[in-house]
Image: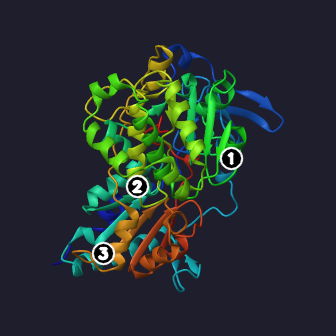
Amino acid sequence: MKIEVSRRKFLQGSVALTVLGGSTIAVPNLFSNEEEKAKPKLNTKTGTGEAEEIATLCEMCVNKCAAIARVENGRVTKLDPNPLFPKSKNMLCPRGNAGIQALYDPDRLKYPMIRNGEKGSGEFKRVTWDEAHAYITEKTLKILDEEKDNRSSFLFCAGEGMAEHTFRTFYSAFGSSNWLNHASICLMTVAAGFSTTLGSYPQADLDNAEYVIMAGANRAEAIVTPDTMDLFKRTQRRGAKLICVDPRFTNTAAKADKWLAIKPGTDLAFVLALTHVVLTEELYNKQYVEDHFNGFEEYSDLVISNKYTPEWAAEITGLRADDITEIAREFMAHAPRAIYYPGRRSTFAQNDFQLRRAMAIFQGLSGGIDTKGGLIFGDKIPIKGHAGLQPIYDRAQARASGKKEELVTGEEGYDDCAISTPAGSWIGWRNRYLEDKMDYNVRGMFIYKHNPVLNMPNSAKTIEMLKKMELVVAIDTMPSDTVMYADVVLPEAHYLERTDPVKTFGG
């Protein structure tokens, strides 16, 4: 069947939508009021000329903290925190400050390129935008024609970011059923594990906790956000105890009261052993279990009958049985102000989903669910005109502290910012594709700011997948490992060069 698509329509609906290099870095400040807006700009004089301060957001991690960009002679020279942004608490971490380095990195992709060597060779030729668009259009229409207009013959994948939803709009308009993003190699197991067990992915009220188990989460040096400051500046100073469970002696381990050097991939045995102690010694919150648990007797019988004892776990984890028993007792002694920290980057091993479920159940046994100092859920903030969508922020911390905060929406057109993103499983999809277990041919791939060659286990398999694709279009700011295996490379604008609909409070 002949597909009649004009070149103009294809370009309008595809590559051009993500390349916004001509836009300004300024974005509306959603957390200012009319009085703040009426104030004069905070311009100052420096040795190089007039400096303008423009409100923006940081995209160096999922939290999207608000920032103030100092611009001198058309260049960003400094990034400062925006004191009006409630989550970051007037802080911009080192990663956020490094956004300028990413903006002016000498290796930035600056023009379209088409591969003229073997995939992975890094050999590309510079082309014009028109040449790149024409090449993509020709190859795409050829595949669609040969696959009888099966739009699912193309895979779309994207990294996390403020423009991810724009790329997803392209994918939706294209009509493919194949969508992958970063979640399945990041937080999918913890989000799915806690959601299927508790109904939602909670926050940890570290600021009110008395006892914290932090397993596989290195918060002292990875994504340093304000709740990290809560943990290390206030939580420990008031006498709270921190247990770090990690194979490596990390900065978090250095700050902990106790470090358990667990064997990689054995955390589930550790949690089951903690649960065994709590159940056999009847340390759990009986009222909470009676009011909120389903299948408690079955789960208790499972843990006890299988003899998931500290001694059993010690042989698997490399930890001392006495330490496991002591931690279980201490945790319940401090409950409900005790937290088994859920974590974020949680996709490490095959049993991670069940691990996160076991963690949620253990936390529930303490009664530390939706309580101060435990795992908490927030009140929903409706978005004007979009009350049915996923809210921008669950005000869990505000509930825990008792503070009343008002979210002021920004200028018209910028409050449609809460977007739910469905995502498939990267590893499962890749393996089915390589094993020819798909129900149809998948021959092309559009990939936006995503680097699965580096970020996924077994890079050789991911490279094999990219080589098998007839058309790989990579849109990125940097020449990543994945870009090296693309057929067409398109340079993306840095987040300080774009205006995006705002999606924040992500972490």
Pick whichever of labels 1 and 2 is earlier in the sequence.
Answer: 2
Query: Disc 2 marks which residue?
Result: 17
The vertical placement of 399 against 25, above or below, is above
Q: Amino acid at mark 2?
A: Leu
Query: What's the mark number on residue 98?
Result: 1
Residue 188 in view of the camera: no
The quarter of the image holding the N terminus is: bottom left
Q: Residues within 10 Å of mark 1 (few under 14, many from 20)?
A: some
Q: Amino acid at mark 3?
A: Val
Residue in view at x 51 percent, y 82 percent: 119
Residue 48 % position (x, y): 81, 39
Residue in view at x 49 percent, y 16 percent: 34
Element class at badge 2: helix
Q: Nearer the viewer, residue 309 or 225?
A: 309
Element class at badge 1: loop
Query: Disc 3 marks which residue?
Result: 442
Residue 12 % position (x, y): 35, 58
Q: Nearer the viewer, residue 433 or 332?
A: 332
**Residue 126 sits in quarter:** bottom right
Query: What's the mark number on residue 3?
Result: none
**Residues at marks 3 and 1 touching, judged by CB atoms closer than 8 Å:** no
Measure the C-alpha gap from mark 3 to mark 2: 23 Å
The vertical placement of 89 against 249, above or below, is above
Measure the C-alpha gap from mark 1 to mark 2: 26 Å
Q: Is residue 315 left or right of residue 287?
A: right
Specify the color scheme. Answer: rainbow
Q: Nearer the viewer, residue 203 or 319?
A: 319
